[in-house]
Amino acid sequence: MIIDCHTHVWQYPGHLSETFVQEASLMRKTPINMNIDLADHWKAMGPVDRAFVFAIKFAHSGMVVPNEYVADYVKQHPEKLIGVASVDPTEKGAVEELERAVQDLGMKALKLSSIYQNFHPCDERAMAVYEKACQLRIPLIVHQATTFPRNAPLKYANPVLMEDVALKFPDLKIVLAHLGHPWEREAIVLIRKQPNVYADLSALYYRSWQFYNSMLLCVEYDVTHKLLFGSDYPVTTPQDSIDNLHRVNRHVIDTPLPKVSKDVIEEIIHRDTLSVLGIET
Ligand SMILES: [Zn+2]
């Protein structure tokens, strides 16, 4: 069983602002697909058994993929796809919208991001949303990491800021997307000491030296059992992410430098993320 816990769908024009698209194209050597055909997403999920699909409510940064849009797509493939809701804690009605997305649309998790949505992780409006997620017994996936839009505030982005949330809501399962890059060390020490905080490895492998070093740090801090497989499609595909996890040691193969073991890599790829996060389907 392979579960991709981090994938996107969006339409352009429609779900992304012009500024977002311009900034994205400046930032990447290889431009990512700005209009995702649902058939392309479905095809790319071929190598995995289950895939999380994110709604996105990041108006501050120019990305809004409605819960209904994702729920409609998930309904086409309910045996494989898992809908992840998004709400904007800075907007009125966020708590009610989350309840509706879970109870009426069948979404199974919540996606938020302090940096994309411009709020401090401990903002009381966000606390109310976490509390609702706890009541609904759904996990929280947070992009608590850097990103490229110029007006997305780095001051809210460090994964360590999630520690107070984890302490206040000890039963809330929290996933730090992208291992909190470039604050992987902070993410690692947080997932090590907070029992219900995990991290996904999506969209990291193409910074191959940083990825090797982060993975090695995970081994040395003994947190590899808290790592979840993800691709961040369309940024990478599940197949490329699997292949490049297998190649994590490629810079050090014929050297005495330490390696990430095959067993660790296979465990991550085949982790039962649904059970880990308490998601029933
Ligand atoms: Zn993503």
Image (cartoon, helix red, strand yellow):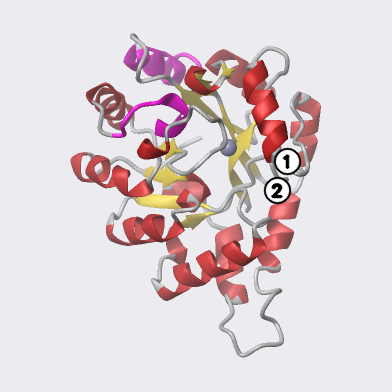
**In the rendered image, which quarter is residue 134 located in?**
top left
- Residue 103 % position (x, y): 42, 17
* Of residues 51 and 211, the one drawn nearer to the viewer in this rendering: 211
Instruction: Write the residue at 47% across / 30% down.
Output: 152
The answer to whether the residues at label 2 and label 1 have Cβ atoms under 8 Å apart is yes
Instruction: Tell me residue 268's x, y (percent).
Output: 56, 61
From the image, tell me which residue sits under label 1: 45
Magenta range: 94-121
Residue at screen point 75% across, 36% down = 32
- Give the quadrant of residue 95: top left
For image coordinates 67% across by 39% down, the residue present is: 27
Q: Assess mark 1: CB under 8 A from ligand 1? A: no
Question: Residue drawn 72% across and 14% down?
Answer: 13
Foreground disc of the pair 2, 1: 2
Residue 207: give its label. none
Q: Name the residue under label 2.
A: 238
**Badge 2 amino acid:** Pro
Task: Give the secondary structure at mark 1.
Answer: loop
Q: Can residue 16 be seen in this view?
A: no
Tag 2 secondary structure: helix
Q: How far apart are marks 2 and 1 (CA)?
A: 7 Å
Q: Is residue 164 left or right of residue 202?
A: left
Number of dots carrying numbers? 2
Rendering coords of residue 212 (x, y %) = 59, 68
- Mark 1 residue type: Met
Q: Badge 1, how many Cα within 10 Å: few under 14, some, many 20+? A: many
Name the quarter showing ligand 1.
top right
Name the side, left or right, on which 73 lies relative to 273.
right
Residue 109 lies in the magenta-colored region: yes
Q: Does the magenta stretch include residue 68?
A: no
